[in-house]
Image (spheres, grey):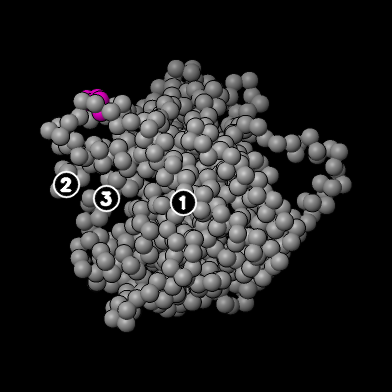
Amino acid sequence: MADPIHTEFTEEERITLGNYVTNASGNVFAWKLGEQLDSEAAGALLSRYSRSSMTSREIFLKEFLPNRDRGREFFRTWLIGYGDDSIQEMAGGIPVSAEYISNVAAKELEDSRIASYIEKSTRYVDFSRKIDGYGYQFYRPHEIMASKLSNEYVALMNDLFESYSTHSHVMAKHIRDTNPFEGCAFQIGNEIVKGKEVNDKFSMQGISAEDLHKAYDKAALAASLDIIRDYLPLSTLTHVGISANARSYENIVLKLLSSGLAESRGLAQGMNEELKKIAPSLIRRTEEEHGKEQVEHMKRCAFESRNTVSAVLDSHKKLTMPHLTEMHESVSFIDFAGRGTKNPNEHAMNVVAGTIIYKNSELSLEESIKAARSMSSMEKDAIIGAYVSERKNRRQKPGRAFENLEYTFDMKGTIGSYRDLQRHRIATQERKYFSTEHGYVLRKQYIEAGIADDYKSKMDRVAEMHHKLSKELSPQHAQYTVAFGYNARWYMKMNAREFFHLAELRTMPAGHPDYREMVQEMYNMVRKEHPSIAKHMKFVNMEHTELGRLSSEIRTAMKTNKVK
């Protein structure tokens, strides 16, 4: 991995760390679980990546080593604020840290779905800080730095980070000016309190005026970072915590070894070396003949499929050109259960009710679905309603009968949106290389805050640099220069049960506005075709909120005060 960045530790700290990590200096290392560092503590430790600018070893020395109960305290207190689904996944498996890697490598790493990941957030962590002796937090790939475009690449990355750093303060002020504390409505339990009604003596239901001001500040900061992150390039450095079993790690390593990027291959080699120190008898196929053959097979598949598709499309250019026009919608509904039938909703009800009948009767699956077809819509609706029952919150998910319905969407959204939606690993997802081909977003806040001209200028330079790198090296290497404000293209295929989870989670007010609007659009499409299914998605939020995290921050403050 090019230009490794090292956190400086004292000799005493390195000796101490040696008891807990497989190495005290490299950017890839595994954690040694034991009595001093159990699975709960390791899970809490890696979860801190999401909201901290520190490395995990720094966090360990500062927070966890002095307090052996830190892991338990973290889960008891902060689980309520961080989102339990991703944090809980960090406890269990072999914990590994991959630090100071680019967002390009992080996305390749996270493409392997049978593992749990948590990453340094671009929504809650400010990336304007420079690293001593290194500079702004972007990756310098060996391939680019050895090319004639190295100086131009570094200059552009520095300028993107300079704009990000300068304009983040401008955007924070703009967010506060357009959404002043006094004009905000705070929901506290079942009551709505106006900001102008809050004073120093305010206190109700376990929350004070100071708590409300802190919640407002955090929500405003998150909103400004949400917007200004469009400047960040995919070369931006991040930290990733991984929890997986040995078999999954083996597959991750083999997949990364087949990458066309030296960074990803270096990451794979680093993970392999560190994991061998933890589980040498389990991590071994990567260096055996079968493993080497698998890597070569994956390389060959990628190379031959790309060349063959290109050749075939070239030979049918007149036929294919109309289908290569730019996608104007953010979501296209490509396929769904019952498409092409006279009544897709009735088809969906037959499938779901039929599989519920199968589970609760002596009938075969064929007989169960045939029985469903013979029933009235009211009867099938009653069966599905009983199966779902009364859901009191989004965590009360429906059963597997809903997995028999599938939806396929063609997606176009900002790279930031893709980063969040990629986390739904049960869904089948594949993306094109990140590029500048699909345009970028120009937010109204950029225009209102007076930074639109600078932003457009930077995005034009990004497109120019991407074009040059694609020709000089490859479209895969050119990904490093693409900014988050550009659109990605990918498809998502998922069953209805997973769609319940995605639609209800990703439309919550605390979600990023970009992906929230995309998922709201997806939900409307499903509701139109399968209203009898969508009506059970009771916790989809269809509102649009400026300070989306405000309610969440208030709930967190109230729950934290209660725990204290």
Distance of label 2 from label 3 (alpha carbons): 10 Å
Side of 488 where 43 appears, left or right: left
Side of 388 where 365 appears, left or right: right
- Please say whether residue 252 is visible from this viewpoint: yes
Q: Are marks 1 and 2 in contact (CB under 8 Å)?
A: no
Q: What element carries label 3?
A: helix
Distance of label 1 from label 3 (alpha carbons): 28 Å
Q: Are marks 1 and 3 in contact (CB under 8 Å)?
A: no
Q: Name the residue under label 2.
A: 563
Is the residue 319 above or below the residue 244 in the image?
above
Nearest the camera: 377 or 553?
553
Percent x, y for residue 449? 48, 36
Front disc: 1 or 2: 1
Q: Name the residue under label 3.
A: 78
Percent x, y for residue 179? 36, 30
Q: What element carries label 2?
A: helix
Type of amino acid at the residue the image marks with label 3: Trp
Front disc: 1 or 3: 1
- Please say whether residue 369 is visible from this viewpoint: no
Side of 564 where 6 appears, left or right: right
Percent x, y for residue 300? 71, 64
Looking at the image, tell me whether mark 1 or mark 3 is earlier in sequence order.
3
Nearest the camera: 382 or 259?
259
User: Is 192 one of the magenta-colored residues?
Assistant: yes
Percent x, y for residue 447? 53, 33
Q: What stretch is highlighted in magenta?
A: 189-195
Q: Mark 1 points at which residue?
A: 165
